[in-house]
Amino acid sequence: MKKPLRIGLVGYGFMGRTHSNAYRKVNNFFDLEYQPVLQAVCARDAAKAQAFADQWGYASIETDWRKLVERKDIDLIDICSPNNTHAEIAIAAARAGKMILCEKPLSMNGPEGETMVAEVEKAKVPNMVWYNYRRVPAVTLAKQLIDQGRLGRIFHYRAKFLQDWTISKDLPQGGTGLWRLDVNVAGSGVTGDLLAHCIDTALWLNGNIKDVSAMTETFVKERKHTLSGKVEKVGIDDACAFLAHFDNGSLATFESTRYARGHKALYTFEINGENASIAWDLHDLHRLQFFDHKDEGLTRGWKSLHITDSDHPYMKHWWVPGLQIGYEHTFVHQVADFIESITKGEKAHPDFRDSLETQNVCDAVLKSAQNGRWENVKHA
Ligand SMILES: NC(=O)c1ccc[n+]([C@@H]2O[C@H](COP(=O)([O-])OP(=O)(O)OC[C@H]3O[C@@H](n4cnc5c(N)ncnc54)[C@H](O)[C@@H]3O)[C@@H](O)[C@H]2O)c1
């Protein structure tokens, strides 16, 4: 008999769906001590919350997250609401002794993140942030190859996250679906939304970043605000590029934009080491490109590894070798790893403190873009 892990979900949007799907599937594919139970979903509109509860099998609804956090029949609060709500909900949940899974970015900025870290560590509640790309099997394999020393000394880290959905100047800002364009809700633009993913992966694969030099641009300076109906200044960064030094001496370039016509969610990274190089592309997420200088000269070259074998990370839980999995499975992996961690009484990663490091890099990037100078990263 599995122990129940009673979930209280805040927000039923894009991430509310990916997480609910993961909670429902995880025990079908992973042998775990706990079984997630979809206890309650919370959103401000009761009718919409009820429709979501019916569709996904939640036992009840709440329209105020404070009520959800107070409920005795909830073990874990899962925060899938916009960025400006993360801190308040997480702090209340920590004080109520709940486990917390929080969507990325952890917070609106570093200082807010520090408060969140202090609260979860004081309450000693298990906590984790949904930087799900770590759990793409090909990305997890990249981590294993690097940790085995297969690349040798790392010289370069190169990451991009490109989209094209905000090019129209007629697109409003704010409100449902467009909160990412409202700086008061999102905290920042592509830096916190997209580069935060690239930074989390980079810190995990290549260690801490020492300092950064950045530029940002807001191409469309004013947009109508959906809630006020007025044309208002746009406060987010539409595009951001930055240079960085890692503590291990390697150099990095990061770029993100929502103005790269033709690109929908092109997250790529490439790492060049003394002995080997690795490259990965979200649009082809089940493949890892690998170049090993040790290979015999005549046939040496980039290999496209198809990450579907049972000895590849996570893959023995899925189908037979050769058959691929996709985006939604990364969330299933993250739930499975979280449950393993609470079973063993270990920390789940990335936890709030790991994610504060990412937040601090974002803060340094935005500060550097403003003052035109190299900025040191404050370490979490
Ligand atoms: N891990 C990832 O790859 C990834 C991808 C997308 C979004 N995110 C993050 O997930 C979070 C949510 O993004 P999304 O794309 O799901 O947004 P979304 O707009 O699709 O959904 C947000 C949900 O939050 C609800 N909400 C807003 N304010 C609320 C409040 N005060 N109380 C309760 N519910 C409230 C909305 O009704 C909606 O259901 C953001 O922090 C975002 O950065 C992460």
Image (cartoon, rainbow, N blue to C red):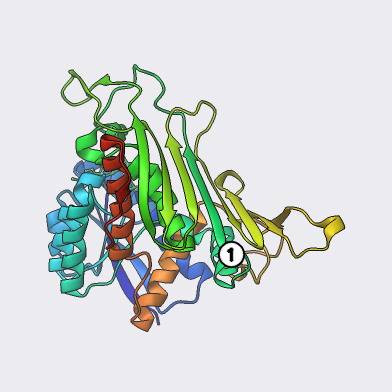
Given the image, on which type of amino acid does mark 1 rest? Leu
Residue at left 54%, top 65%? Answer: 143
Using the rendered image of the protein, determine whether residue 271 is visible from the camera's viewpoint: yes
Residue, x 20% and y 41% (percent of image)?
Answer: 45
Q: Nearer the viewer, residue 94 or 240?
A: 240
Q: Which quadrant does ligand 1 occupy? A: top left
Percent position of residue 116, x then y: 19, 60
Q: For this view, does 65 lie left or right of residue 297?
A: left
- Tell me if I can see residue 24 in this picture: no
Number of other residues with Cα within 10 Å of mark 1, as a class: few under 14, some 14 to 19, many 20 or more = some
The residue depicted at 77 percent of the width and 53 percent of the height is 301
Which quarter of the rendered picture does the N terminus lie within?
A: bottom left
Label 1 belongs to which residue?
141
| Quarter residue 277 falls in | bottom right
Residue 318 point in image, percent of width and height: 60, 65
Q: Residue at x 43, y 33 (%)?
A: 257
Assign a secondary structure to mark 1.
helix
Q: Quadrant of residue 352?
A: bottom left
Q: Is residue 254 left or right of 105 when viewed as pictured?
A: right
Image position, residue 21 (x, y; %): 43, 56
Looking at the picture, does residue 180 appear above or below residue 14? above
Q: Quadrant of the C terminus?
A: bottom left
Q: In x, y percent, where is residue 265?
A: 49, 39
Q: How many marks?
A: 1
Mark 1 C-beta closer than 8 Å to ligand 1: no
Choose between 55 and 161: the one closer to the eye. Answer: 161
Q: Is residue 6 left or right of residue 93?
A: right
